[in-house]
Image (cartoon, coloured by chain):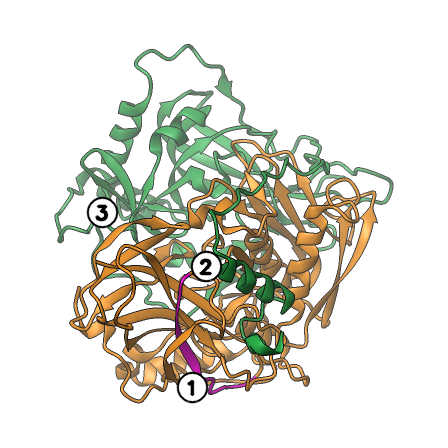
């Protein structure tokens, strides 16, 4: 029996405010980050876009929970979350209608109240605004390219990762900058349960170097091939219809790459290495005379 | 580079960054936050710590017992395979943690899937939508785990090799399987991602200890501290200190990012480099130069220690007590922060020019601490005299 909980969208006014900010915010130079610094990692928007079947910007307007069909007698099924987005703009692919519902494994199972969560998966809440790189809706455990990597949060008109790290643009390339501990990032609702990831961090940095979302959108579009073959529309899923959980069947491990050997060693170096290995890799070796 | 950030601690004693709390202390974060709110001036000195997921003011998501049995897939982790042995090592290292929590293991599970009330681990087929690995957790609304499964995806170029030359942080082409497994089983224990310090629940592949050609994963100070925060301190000996040539460099969302530690001149400027050796950058120094050398010192064990750190110069990347001791320091380190610090040492005169040497730090080089793991006690940087 399918068990379902629906949560209506309650903050449409916030969404409108957010959208106004989205289109009015200009990129303000607040000091130039050091892009050559290893602290700044490049984000491959092109790779995300090319692997996606659908790229769109939208706002979470509804969240439903439903449980997959039993896999065996007595099974209560696997809880899934159906996240419905009000689609504002499609950058790649096609969507039927003004909304699309994505299905993610995880959520609350109404039959017994147990919660399923994936350590590397995104968490969506009502009113979240995002650019999403969708792949495998209805087939993948998390239907985004690279799981949470396929989500760009839009907060106050600027672009951030799932975890609240700034997405910056410099000389036509996207980089990841400082992290902000936004409430949107740290506080979540799963069914009736409110959770928070708590730490001793600042709640919100006073300034941001994150790119306005319009720049990110333009960059994604520019990175796509000039001529894209017509693509089928990505299905929107219905939480009220029966579905099966994706089986993550065990497989043999990948081929382990052989290690390369080091360069030539002197007799003394070889003796020292042998002594280290004989000592269980404890570097405090017996005196040479005691060997 | 400002010299202020690299000044040697004149007391040779690492300051504690926040109050250490022992025992079952799921209120640690809350206590700390209140303290920060009351004393803003303390913020700059306050370091950081593990992250937990809270479902109420007093309940984090955790095991409501002190053990969890992990069942290995017979297909993915057959008994005796290199993958199984590597995973066993990871579990064994986690079980050295100073808390009351332990994993037990069971081989040859022929029926693994999520939602069967068994904690299992296996490889699954990866694709563009899957992360490299993940922990799938089932938990009750009051915060108790019912099941945790760790799944590795096979589209990642993992290796079980512990040889540094194979590993991405040292210029190799493979991701170390053991650091990823260490991270995922940290989730299985109840830890969330952490980005405030050098730690295994951040970017895992460069949270690693290396001596000679051998690299090993470890849970580190913050992993041990988080385990104690959830499950309390065990009553055994449980002591371990370590040193690594990696440090915190920033945040990537929930993850800390790490970089190699560095060598500075006495003015605090990063010394010039030329090329790499065994995946590490080679510093260029003058004969007999006085330098500041930076490493991350950690207490992964049960109680505060005052180990003696020996600084050695070696003709190879294998740092042992057979090498030339040039200086010692005696810091005090607790299980409350990662202590990335620089110490001033003077390199010996008369070293051969254009030959590679290694400046290594060996913590507890006099073997005064009864550690459960002495193999993570060295780290080194490469240099040449020109």
Q: Position of residue A39 (x, y in %)?
A: 30, 53
Q: To which residue does mark 2 refer?
A: A187
Alpha carbon separation for disc pair 2 and 3: 33 Å
Residue matched to label 1: B332
Q: Position of residue A116 (x, y in %)?
A: 64, 51
Q: CA distance from mark 1 to mark 3?
A: 36 Å
The answer to whether tags 2 and 3 share a subunit is: yes
Which corner quadrant holds the N terminus of chain A? top right
The part of the chain drawn in magenta is B303-315
Chain identifier of the green chain: A
Residue B140 appears in the rendering:
no
Chain letter of disc 2 in the image:
A
Image vertical order of residue B269 relative to residue A68, above or below: below
Name the residue rendered at 27%, 87% in the picture.
Answer: B10
3D distance between C-alphas at marks 1 and 2: 37 Å
Q: Which residue is mark 3?
A: A36
């Amino acid at each position: 029996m399918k068990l379902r909980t629906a949560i209506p969208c309650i903050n449409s006014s916030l969404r409108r405010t957010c959208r106004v900010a989205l289109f009015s915010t200009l990129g303000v130079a607040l000091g130039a980050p050091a892009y050559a610094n290893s602290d700044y990692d490049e984000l491959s928007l092109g790779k995300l876009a090319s692997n996606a079947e659908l790229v769109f910007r939208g706002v979470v307007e509804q969240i439903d929970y439903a449980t997959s069909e039993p896999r065996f007698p007595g099974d209560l099924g696997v809880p899934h979350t159906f996240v419905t987005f009000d689609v504002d703009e499609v950058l790649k692919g096609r969507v039927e209608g003004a909304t699309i519902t994505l299905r993610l494994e995880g959520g609350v199972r109404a039959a017994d109240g147990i919660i399923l969560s994936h350590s590397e998966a995104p968490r969506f809440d009502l009113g979240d605004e995002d650019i999403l790189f969708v792949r495998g809706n209805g087939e993948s455990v998390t239907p985004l390219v690279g799981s949470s990597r396929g989500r760009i949060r839009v907060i106050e008109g600027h672009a951030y990762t799932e975890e609240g790290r700034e997405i910056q643009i410099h000389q036509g390339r996207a980089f990841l900058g400082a992290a902000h501990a936004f409430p949107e990032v740290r506080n979540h609702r799963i069914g009736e349960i409110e959770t928070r990831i708590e730490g001793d961090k600042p709640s919100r940095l006073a300034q941001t170097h994150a790119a306005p979302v319009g720049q990110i959108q333009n960059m994604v579009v520019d990175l796509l091939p000039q001529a894209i073959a017509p693509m089928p529309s990505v299905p929107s899923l219905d939480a009220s219809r029966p579905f099966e959980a994706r089986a993550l069947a065990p497989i043999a491990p990948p081929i382990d790459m052989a290690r390369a050997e080091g360069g030539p060693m002197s007799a003394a170096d070889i003796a020292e290495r042998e002594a280290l290995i004989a000592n269980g890799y404890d570097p405090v070796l017996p005196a040479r005379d005691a060997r | 580079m400002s010299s202020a950030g690299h000044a040697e601690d004149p007391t040779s004693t690492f300051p504690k960054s926040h109050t250490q709390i022992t025992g079952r202390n799921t209120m640690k974060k809350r206590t700390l936050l209140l303290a920060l709110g009351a004393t803003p001036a303390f913020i700059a000195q306050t370091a950081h710590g593990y992250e937990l997921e809270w479902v109420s003011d007093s309940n984090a998501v955790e095991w409501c017992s002190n053990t969890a049995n992990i069942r290995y897939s017979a297909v993915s982790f057959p008994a005796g395979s290199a993958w199984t042995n590597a995973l066993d090592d990871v579990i064994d290292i986690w079980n050295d943690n100073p808390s009351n929590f332990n994993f037990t293991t069971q081989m040859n599970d022929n029926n693994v899937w999520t939602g069967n009330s068994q904690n299992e681990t296996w490889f699954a087929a990866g694709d563009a939508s899957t992360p490299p690995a993940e922990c799938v957790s089932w938990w009750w609304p009051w915060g108790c785990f019912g099941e945790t499964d760790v799944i590795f995806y096979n589209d990642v170029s993992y290796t079980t090799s512990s040889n540094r030359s194979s590993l991405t942080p040292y210029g190799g082409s493979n991701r170390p399987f053991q650091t990823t497994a260490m991270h995922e089983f940290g989730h299985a224990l109840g830890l969330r991602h952490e980005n405030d310090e050098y730690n295994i629940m951040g970017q895992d592949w460069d949270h690693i200890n290396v001596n000679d050609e051998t690299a090993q994963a470890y849970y580190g100070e913050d992993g041990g501290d988080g385990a104690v925060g959830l499950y309390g301190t065990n009553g055994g000996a449980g002591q371990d200190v370590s040193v690594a040539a990696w440090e915190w460099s920033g945040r990537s969302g929930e993850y800390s990012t790490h970089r190699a530690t560095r060598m500075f001149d006495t003015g605090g400027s990063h010394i010039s480099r030329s090329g790499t050796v065994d995946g590490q950058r080679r510093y260029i120094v003058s004969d007999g130069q006085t330098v500041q050398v930076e490493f991350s010192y950690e207490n992964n064990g049960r109680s505060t220690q005052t180990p003696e750190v020996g600084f050695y110069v070696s003709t190879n990347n294998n740092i042992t007590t057979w090498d030339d001791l040039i200086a010692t320091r005696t810091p005090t380190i607790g299980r409350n922060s990662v202590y990335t610090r620089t110490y001033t040492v003077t390199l010996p005169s008369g070293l051969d020019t254009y030959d590679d040497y290694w400046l290594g730090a060996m913590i507890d080089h006099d073997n005064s601490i009864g550690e459960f793991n002495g193999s993570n006690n060295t780290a080194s940087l490469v240099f040449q005299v020109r």
